[in-house]
Image (cartoon, rainbow, N blue to C red):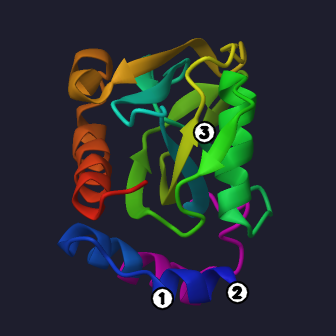
Amino acid sequence: MNLVKQIKNYHPFNEQEAAAQRVILDCFEIFPDLLTRENEVAHLTASAFTLNENKDKTLMVYHNIYDSWAWTGGHADGNDNLFQVARQELIEETGVKNIRALSREIYALDLLPVFAHCKNNNFVAGHLHLNLSYLLQAAEKDKLQIKPDENKGVKWIPLSEIRNYSTEKDMYPVYEKIISKFKLNGVT
């Protein structure tokens, strides 16, 4: 199924997601290049919210640019299989090997503002990430490994302590929405 159809068929969890769904679909009508960073206004990204086997911790990285603990994820960079992008970013950023999809479907939709910053000595203008999230599970026993060009640490963080680690206050509602959704839906 193509990506636009997946997004159209997604059932928003709340009003925020319904608005994000409308904006993302509108962006597909306006921009021909949402799958690449060539679009400096908005482009697609994919994130993995990764749970341990007991579903009481999430795997996070200490992100170099945001200087905060955060979920894993990255740019589509031309790949229209955003589940695959989220899974690959999880592997690259954390080193985990034993991964299971709790859902291969889009699990959350978000519009994530990115403020202007420098990356690899290049200026990156502020823009919007049209983010699709996926719910994954990894083995807590797997050896964790940082990806030095992107993060300084990898750690399993209790769900109840995310706010103690993440300094990105704008991300609290995103993480809390995903946690509420999987607790409500009884993900196994």
User: For mark 3, what is the residue?
Assistant: 124
Vertical placement of 7 versus 155: above or below?
below
- Crowding around mark 2 (Cα neighbors within 10 Å: few <14, some 14 to 19, many 20+) is few
**Kind of residue at badge 1:** Asn
Q: Position of residue 50 (x, y in %)?
A: 50, 39
Left or right: residue 161 compared with residue 34 = left
Q: Secondary structure at mark 2?
A: loop
**Quadrant of res 148:** top right
- Crowding around mark 1 (Cα neighbors within 10 Å: few <14, some 14 to 19, many 20+) is few
- Seen from the viewer's position, the closer of residues 85 and 23 is 85
- Seen from the viewer's position, the closer of residues 16 and 122 is 16
Q: Answer yes or no: do the residues labelled 2 and 1 have beta carbons within 8 Å?
A: yes
Q: Position of residue 178 (x, y in %)?
A: 32, 52
**Quadrant of res 188:** bottom left
Q: Secondary structure at mark 3?
A: strand
Q: Position of residue 183 (x, y in %)?
A: 25, 52
**Kind of residue at badge 3:** Val
Q: Of marks 3 and 1, which one's residue comes earlier in the chain?
A: 1
Query: Disc 2 vs disc 3: which is toward the camera?
Result: 2
Point 71% across, 73% down: residue: 33
* Distance between the alpha carbons at the discs numbered 2 and 3: 32 Å
Instruction: Tell me, yes or no, whether the highlighted magenta stretch contains residue 36.
Output: yes
Q: Answer yes or no: do the residues labelled 2 and 3 have beta carbons within 8 Å?
A: no
**Kind of residue at badge 2:** Met
User: For mark 2, what is the residue?
Assistant: 1
Q: Which residues are magenta?
A: 22-41
Point 69% across, 13% down: residue: 143
Q: Quadrant of the N terminus?
A: bottom right
Query: Disc 3 vs disc 1: which is toward the camera?
Result: 1
* Distance between the alpha carbons at the discs numbered 2 and 1: 10 Å
Q: Of marks 2 and 3, which one's residue comes earlier in the chain?
A: 2
Q: Which mark is residue 9?
A: 1
